[in-house]
Image (cartoon, rainbow, N blue to C red):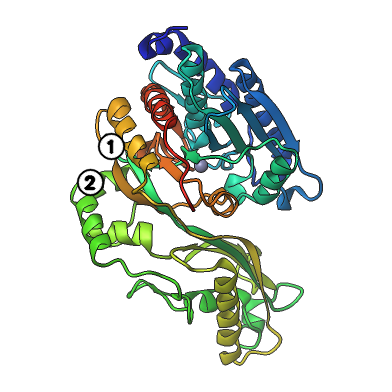
Amino acid sequence: MGENIDDYLKDAMPEFRQQLARLVAIPSSSQEPEHVGDLLRIVQETASIARGYGFTTHILQSKGDPSENFVAGLVATLQVDPNAPWIIVYNHLDVQPEGEGWLTKAFLPAVTDEKIVGRGATDDKGPMLTTLHAVNYLRAAGKLKVNVALVHETKEEAGSTGFDKLIQESIDQQLLPTPHSILVCDTVFQGDNPAISSSLRGLLAAEVTVTTGTQAIHSGLGGGIAVNPMNVLTTVLASCYNMATRKVNIPTFYDGVPRIEGEAKLNLQKVADGFDLERYKRDLRAGACYRQSTLDALRRNWFEPTFEIHNYKGGLEGTKIPPMASAQVTMRLVGQQDPDAVFAYFERHLHHYLAQLDLLNVKLDVKKVKGSRAVSVAIDNPYVLAAADACEVGFGRKPVYDGCGGTIGALPVFQERFPQAPIVLLAISRVDDGYHAPNEEFKFSQAEKGVKVISDYLQRIATLPKLQP
Ligand SMILES: [Zn+2]
């Protein structure tokens, strides 16, 4: 393997392609119980690659109900010097469900010279492997001056359930040293502008079920007497969101939502001035969109909460009045919004609204599915500045400091456990890779640039001090 990065990439990229194809072929979907065994398989496969690059690997498995636990995780360490600082590199090895609309098979990766197409290619297996190769390049060239601890979970797409336990067990078993910093490559950038994110939104997911009876009723004989649960569900959910004002109508919902004003607004305006919103919409494959300025679009995507309805169920028997209807709801959260508190506001509002409808024998159940707080990270510390300089080396330009509308449930856990360790959110994936979409892909040019950025970053941080919390 070459001492110089270009030589290394020339040698290593054919192997990179094969490794990534093997990883993508494992259907490690964390939201579908039938794939729970694949979560262990993807950890084992990744561990074997990491061992080949000098890591000591530990595979942790949880006991009990998989839907409430971390199932399988990888903690791997590569210590080059007992006195050198430790960095935690976080990635997730699980993927979204296959979904519809694929031109190729989601778990039969299609590899060309340019890219690989398959579920998980860019979110987050490609960036994970990119990081491993960056470490391997430095190690092989004798340039690795930081100790690296990999923390790979398999429940990110399911809300990082049990991640706290994974970290606790790793600490208890003395597998995980206290890090000086944490690197996360699980966000995206637009066009040719590399990005370092300063915030991610939190997430509250809930399920709402309305039950009105035990069997379907003829809508002619019963309509006007019997209550339709689909109508009830639609009515109570519609009361939560005003599409005209684009505001969530749940009382006290906005407690803890910061205003974007002053310098923050000026910064956002600067990003908006260089942001191609139309291209972003195309990359997202977005059809209908809100009519708004680029500034408002970014503000609402990064710094405001949302209310979205998904997966309506019920009314499967033609035009009969069904006995039951349900839907899922997600709310992206920002600032200090607390998922448990927001869930309580939501539940109280639905029951209150239903009571006003004055109906007989309607049963309303609201269940919290998952919750995670919003995260903001400082972008004015030497670690972020080092990452910005590394972007110039690897991507040829300074990064944009953006927000991210998505959620990584592991980050609040890291912030609680290691408050002194700055988290750097360095994007390797691009918006047009199709996170969570059909035909998800990862471009090998991104991998090559990513290896350059990350290896440069790891060299820069070797001499940085430990920060105070
Ligand atoms: Zn991800």
Q: Position of residue 282 (x, y in %)?
A: 30, 44
x 55%, y 85%: residue: 353
Judge by depth and name the residue closer to the eye, 158 or 182: 182
- Asked if residue 386 lies left or right of residue 365, the reply is left
Residue for badge 1:
191
x 61%, y 63%: residue: 313
Instruction: Give the CA separation, mark 1 to mark 2.
Output: 8 Å
Residue farthest front in this picture: 83
Give the SS element for disc 2.
loop
- Asked if residue 86 lies left or right of residue 362, the reply is left
Q: Is 166 above or below relative to 74?
A: below
Q: Position of residue 268 (x, y in %)?
A: 25, 56
Q: Is 267 above or below relative to 167?
A: below
Residue 112 occupies which quadrant of the picture? top left
Q: Position of residue 331 (x, y in %)?
A: 50, 64
Say which amino acid is labelled 1: Gly
- Asked if residue 443 lies left or right of residue 343, the reply is left
Q: Is 453 above or below relative to 405?
A: above
Q: Position of residue 99 (x, y in %)?
A: 55, 42
Q: Is 252 above or below relative to 7?
A: below
Q: Residues within 10 Å of mark 2 (few under 14, many from 20)?
A: few
Question: Tag on residue 276?
Answer: 2
Of the two numbered discs 1 and 2 on the same chain, state the one appearing first in sequence.
1
Answer yes or no: do the residues labelled 1 and 2 have beta carbons within 8 Å? yes
Say which amino acid is labelled 2: Asp
Give the SS element for disc 1.
loop
Residue 104 visible in the picture: no
